[in-house]
Image (cartoon, rainbow, N blue to C red):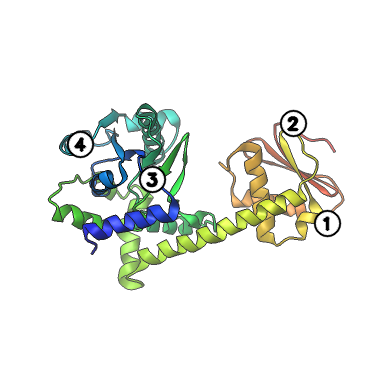
């Protein structure tokens, strides 16, 4: 079990390794009232003077369990008052928003939460948004993605930092276990709330957290969480190398630039290992549409099939987001439009 000193040390090591925050930074702390986020807030208060940090707390009341949600907001507001921290909150109707957006409750909650965090960061002129994701969250994410058949990129799990709109989203507690944060709060007499939705088996993550991981720890590997977190680190390093190498290959294989599309020289690309071919195609799609939403491994495989086809006929396939892959002789063209490319 880690002491307060050890927890702060873990946080600072994570910061040094990933370059999360710096002296005189303005940070928005996402605090739900649960143990992880309350511990995050307490730890940053301990670091506030050392780094001359300007801290602001943002809380989202999802209203999923009305009475409990109100209690969580009240508790976070009280803590902010005690710690002299500015407090911002918003209340949303999660079920109504999920219906409007045609998304799951979990995804809707994430979308609305980050929308509000960005608003608070803008209002307070903060550079970073800080969330309390832990090693437990990392392990759950990696295991979920294994179950869904993810490739190396999916096994990269939760990044320590990424862009969130015009701000930087940082997660300095990814090397810390939830149990250590709970013990830290208990030792310091800090009360936190328990979110009942975190035990609802309707959500796949909760089934992994409360059922599958416990079975794996009990019957196979007591250190399963750390093992999954290590797999994430290895996968991230492999993916970073793959992306950098594929970018060089992409530049070597790229044909004449076309508006709204990318052209690749087939014979050049085929000389490289399959893993690099796949990553080059992924980068081409990202370059065209700026994201990979709705693009699955089966779609990338379909593009590889026409890349490797021995036929001299013109080949064409239609993919999600109005994306068209077109192979003619030695050129593979990817376009993002609804126009069928004529042979």
| Marks 2 and 3, the one that precedes in the sequence | 3
Cβ atoms under marks 3 and 1 closer than 8 Å:
no
Disc 2 versus disc 1: distance between alpha carbons?
25 Å
Residue 253 x, y percent position in the rendering: 76, 51
Q: Which mark is residue 22?
A: 3
Residue 212 position in % (x across, y down): 35, 61
- Residue, disc 1: 310
| Marks 1 and 4 in Cβ contact (< 8 Å) | no
**Callout in the foreground (1, 4):** 4
Q: Residues within 10 Å of mark 2 (few under 14, many from 20)?
A: few
Q: Is residue 224 above or below residue 332?
A: below
Q: Is residue 126 visible?
A: yes
Mark 2 vs 1, N-terminal side: 1
Q: Nearer the viewer, mark 2 or mark 3?
A: 3
**Residue 80's disc number:** 4
Q: Is residue 136 visible?
A: no
Q: Is residue 334 left or right of residue 184?
A: right
Residue beneath label 2, please?
Answer: 339
Foreground: 47 or 265? 47
- Mark 4–mark 3 Cα distance, whole angstroms, equals 22 Å
Residue at the far left: name it: 189
- Depth-wise, is mark 2 or mark 4 nearer the camera? 4
Q: Secondary structure at mark 2?
A: loop
Question: In this view of the protein, which residue sits in the foreground, 317 or 56?
Answer: 56
280 left or right of 152? right
**Precedes in sequence: disc 4 or disc 3:** 3
For marks 2 and 4, the one nearer the N-term is 4
Q: Nearer the viewer, residue 41 or 74?
A: 41
């Amino acid at each position: 079990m880690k002491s307060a000193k050890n927890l702060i040390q873990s946080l600072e090591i994570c910061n040094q390794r990933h370059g999360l925050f710096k002296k005189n930074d303005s940070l928005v702390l996402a605090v739900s009232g649960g143990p992880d986020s309350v511990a995050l807030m307490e730890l940053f208060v301990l670091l506030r003077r050392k780094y001359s940090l300007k801290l602001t707390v943002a809380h989202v009341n999802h209203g999923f369990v009305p009475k409990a949600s109100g209690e969580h907001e009240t508790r976070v507001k009280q803590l902010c008052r005690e710690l002299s921290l500015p407090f911002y909150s918003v209340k949303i109707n999660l079920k109504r928003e999920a219906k409007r957006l045609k998304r799951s409750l979990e995804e809707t909650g994430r979308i609305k939460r980050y929308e509000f965090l960005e608003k608070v960061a803008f209002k307070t002129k903060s550079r970073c948004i800080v969330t309390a994701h832990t090693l437990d969250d990392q392990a759950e994410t990696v295991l979920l993605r294994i179950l869904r058949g993810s490739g190396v990129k999916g096994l990269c799990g939760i990044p320590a930092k990424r862009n969130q709109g015009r701000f930087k989203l940082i997660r300095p507690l990814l090397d810390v276990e939830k149990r250590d944060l709970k013990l830290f709060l208990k030792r310091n007499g800090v009360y936190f709330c328990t979110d009942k939705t975190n035990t609802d088996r309707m959500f796949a993550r909760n089934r992994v957290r409360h059922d599958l991981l416990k079975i794996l720890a009990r019957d196979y590997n007591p250190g399963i969480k750390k093992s999954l977190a290590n797999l994430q680190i290895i996968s991230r390093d492999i993916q970073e190398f793959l992306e950098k190498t594929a970018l060089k290959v992409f530049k070597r294989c790229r044909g004449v630039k076309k508006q709204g599309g990318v052209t690749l020289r087939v014979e050049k690309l085929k000389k490289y290992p399959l893993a690099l071919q796949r990553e080059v195609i992924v980068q081409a799609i990202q370059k065209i549409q700026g994201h990979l939403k709705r693009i699955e491994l089966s779609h990338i495989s379909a593009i590889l099939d026409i890349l490797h086809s021995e036929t001299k006929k013109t080949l064409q396939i239609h993919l999600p987001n109005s994306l068209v892959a077109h192979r003619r002789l030695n050129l593979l063209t990817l376009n993002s439009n609804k126009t069928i490319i004529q042979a």
